[in-house]
């Protein structure tokens, strides 16, 4: 009897997870046609990058799980959006002045990793150093700067795009529930893609 109850509970859980992971219609071609072509392509690929508006991020990643307004050190208000799937690999997006400013992977499993030393990052511009210290990513970072900020990826793949540019994808938080791909084009951070649900691809 206990085995039967266990099977029923697991079946209900799997049905809930699979039904929750079904993708909603994030946008229509009419809704995104006013955006620049490169932004439209990001939205179609489910990719975000700093500089995007909240509306563009919604079209690319759907609605966040949580939103809060905070006052920054410069007295300006920032808006923080949280994405997670059943508690897995929560990501925080920070908006200021209506633009995506930074992306943080709140992965508690990576807190023990010494991602950088002061000596290693001292040659970077001050704003890059600050983002690294806060565990944030911004568009234009190099692979080494991303490694300093988020630590070592769980997987790396390389390819050539049709336009001849090199493309490298770093995988973070790759689990059955969620994974995040950091995209580099010609050695610079170009965007992030997030997949959630059982068997995320």
Image (cartoon, rainbow, N blue to C red):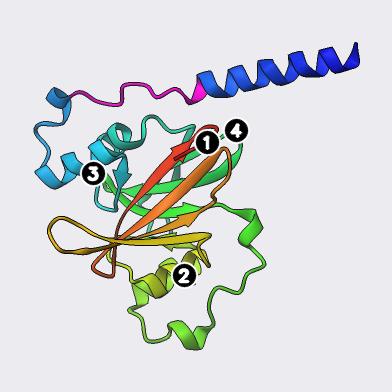
Circle 1 residue:
199
Label 2 and label 1: CA atoms lie apart by 26 Å
Q: Is residue 157 left or right of residue 14?
A: left
Which quarter of the figure has residue 136?
bottom left
Label 3 and label 1: CA atoms lie apart by 22 Å
How crowded pointer 3 is (Cα within 10 Å; few <14, some 14-19, many 20+) is rated as many
Name the front one of labels 3 and 1. Answer: 1
Q: Which mark is residue 147?
A: 2
Q: Secondary structure at mark 3?
A: helix
How crowded pointer 1 is (Cα within 10 Å; few <14, some 14-19, many 20+) is rated as few
| Whether label 4 touches label 2, CB < 8 Å | no
Label 2 and label 3: CA atoms lie apart by 23 Å
The residue closer to the viewer here, 34 or 171, is 171
Magenta span = 20-28
Q: Is residue 87 left or right of residue 138?
A: right
Mark closest to the chain's N terminus, 4 or 2: 4
Q: Which mark is residue 42?
A: 3
Q: Secondary structure at mark 4?
A: loop
Mark closest to the chain's N terminus, 2 or 3: 3
């Amino acid at each position: 009897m206990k085995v039967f109850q266990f099977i029923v509970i697991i079946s209900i859980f799997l049905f809930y997870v699979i039904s929750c992971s079904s993708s909603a219609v994030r946008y229509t071609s009419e809704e995104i046609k006013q955006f620049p072509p490169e932004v439209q392509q990001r939205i179609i690929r489910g990719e975000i990058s700093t500089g995007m508006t909240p509306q563009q991020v919604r079209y690319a990643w759907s609605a966040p799980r949580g939103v809060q307004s905070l006052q920054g050190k410069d007295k300006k208000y920032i808006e923080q959006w949280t994405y997670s799937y059943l508690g897995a690999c929560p990501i925080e997006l920070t908006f200021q002045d209506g633009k995506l400013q930074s992306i943080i992977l709140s992965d508690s499993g990576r807190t023990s990793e010494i991602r950088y030393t002061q000596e290693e990052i001292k040659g970077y511009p001050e704003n890059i150093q600050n983002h690294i210290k806060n565990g944030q990513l911004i568009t234009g970072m190099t692979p080494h700067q991303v490694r300093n900020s988020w630590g070592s990826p769980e997987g790396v793949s390389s390819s050539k795009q049709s336009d001849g540019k090199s493309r490298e994808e770093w995988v973070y938080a790759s689990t059955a529930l969620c994974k995040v791909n950091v995209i580099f084009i010609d050695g610079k951070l170009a965007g992030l893609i997030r997949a959630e649900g059982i068997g995320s691809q």
